[in-house]
Image (cartoon, helix red, strand yellow):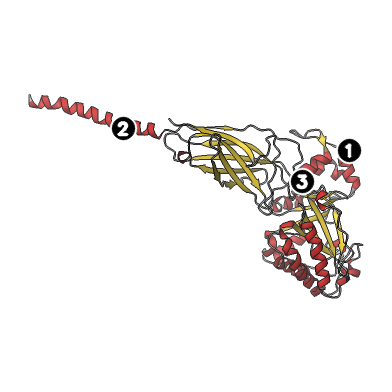
Amino acid sequence: MKIKKLIIPIIVLLITIPAIITAYYAYRRYLYYLPVRYEHNKCSTTTSALDNPYCGFYQIYPYKITSTSTGGNILPGNINEIKDRLAMVQVNLSMYKDMPLSSDALSQLDSILAAWAGSNKQLILRFLYDWDGNASATEPSDINIVLEHMEQTASVYNKYANSIYILQGLYIGSYGEMHGSAHQDKRDIIKLAKKLYNVSDPLIFLAVRTPAQLRTIKKGTDGLVTDRLGLFNDGILSSESDCGTYGEGKRRQELKFQDRLCISVPNGGETIIENPLNNIGNAVKDLRKMHVSYLNSMYDTDVLDKWKASVYNGKGIFNEYNGYEYIEKHLGYRYAISSSGLEFEPYSDKTATLNISLENTGFAPCYYPPCYTITCINQETNKTYTLTPEINAPDNGITEIRLSATINVRGMEPGIYKIYLDTADSKTGETIKYAIDTPLGQYGYLAGTLSFLDK
């Protein structure tokens, strides 16, 4: 009988204890439960002009360094009123072909660059000795003078590195284009490239005229200079060889080379000689493969006028758009927010993960990595939480960028939060504009809304 009397309490205990434990953990789970809701801000892409740094058409502004303190150089009346964000400043040093630059010469250069640096333009800077296609008559016969000029000019332009996008060329050749020079053999080009790399500020990209020259420099310097060495092409779409930019029969191969190379370094120049290669469809295809970020707006007018009279036929909102305007708006990068979402398990996760996907439909990436900032703003209290996202660029880093940030939702006060994404150029600090119909505000673009309340 005693055993029977013990069995019932034991059974009750065996049933009760698990029930108590289950109830305890269920209650703890209930206490931990945090219902969080996120809604993506649906936006549409636009055809608007964006006015971002390092992108678009440019014009040439030539200056000749003279032996007098003024030099007779005339700056544009109001640089800030120039529409283009890019400007090519060409500086002719031919008056000093046989000697080092004087203090007056360096002062002239400083005055020119100081005036441009006070604008919102980014400079494509080209030093040269020839404007007439006769480099042998105007450039130094001694390469050591060129090397000295490189060092002297660097002491001036490095002060304005934040305003200089690219140093184009190695000072030599007809029009500064690295052909027709006594100093264009492989040994000299390697020597000049190493010097320019070593004296110039690391923030400034360098560019040489042909892919073959770039490969020669890369091989001759064990890859030293190639972290910021790109290309410039003043014969874009002019012929199968782009007027000698590539070897005969090498066009397809060199376009593939640029497709890989110019993921990380810039490419641009001018298009010349009206022909089928620069018909709008062909032009867009090759400019995208070359990842072109800048083009001369004055040359060649026959080609540019053909684009202005053309219609781009393609997918999306730019279908049947003016060909010239299509190219203008796709030079460089063109970002849009394509999606955003939140990952959070309300019963177990300590933090939430916000994911934002960006689409770039431009021909090229932004070569200075942007600085992204995510701001969460409580709509009732205006309290803000600032996040720095991690960046993941799948594929080749051009067409898509993914951002992810950890949000400590359990440490935030309950409420409704607007989530904004701000993108700033890491070199100038300027806000990068997106091609979307959401307005740009104080904290950037609205990506979505996050909400959670007390239980």
The disc placed on residue 331 is 3
The disc placed on residue 309 is 1
Residue 98: where, in percent of width, then height? Answer: 86, 75
Q: The residue under label 3 is which amino acid type? A: Leu
- The answer to which of marks 2 and 3 sits earlier in the sequence is 2
Q: The residue under label 1 is which amino acid type? A: Ala
Question: Residue at the spot x=60%, y=46% of the render?
Answer: 373
Task: Check if mark 1's residue and mark 2's residue have beta carbons within 8 Å.
Answer: no
The disc placed on residue 431 is none
Q: Look at the image and tell me whether residue 168 can be seen.
A: no
Q: Which residue is mark 2?
A: 24
Classify 109 as above or below 80: below
Residue 172: where, in percent of width, then height? Answer: 83, 66
Q: CA distance from mark 1 to mark 2?
A: 75 Å
Of tags 1 and 2, which is closer to the observer? 2
The C terminus lies in which quarter of the figure? top left
Quarter-of-image position of residue 288? top right
Query: Tag 3's secondary structure?
Result: loop
Q: The residue under label 2 is which amino acid type? A: Tyr
Task: Check if mark 1's residue and mark 3's residue have beta carbons within 8 Å.
Answer: no
Quarter-of-image position of residue 354? top right
Question: Residue at the spot x=44%, y=40% of the render?
Answer: 350
Q: CA distance from mark 2 to mark 3?
A: 62 Å
- The answer to which of marks 1 and 3 sits earlier in the sequence is 1
Residue 313: where, in percent of width, then height? Answer: 80, 34
Residue 88 relative to residue 41: left or right: right
Query: Tag 1's secondary structure?
Result: loop
Q: CA distance from mark 1 to mark 3?
A: 19 Å
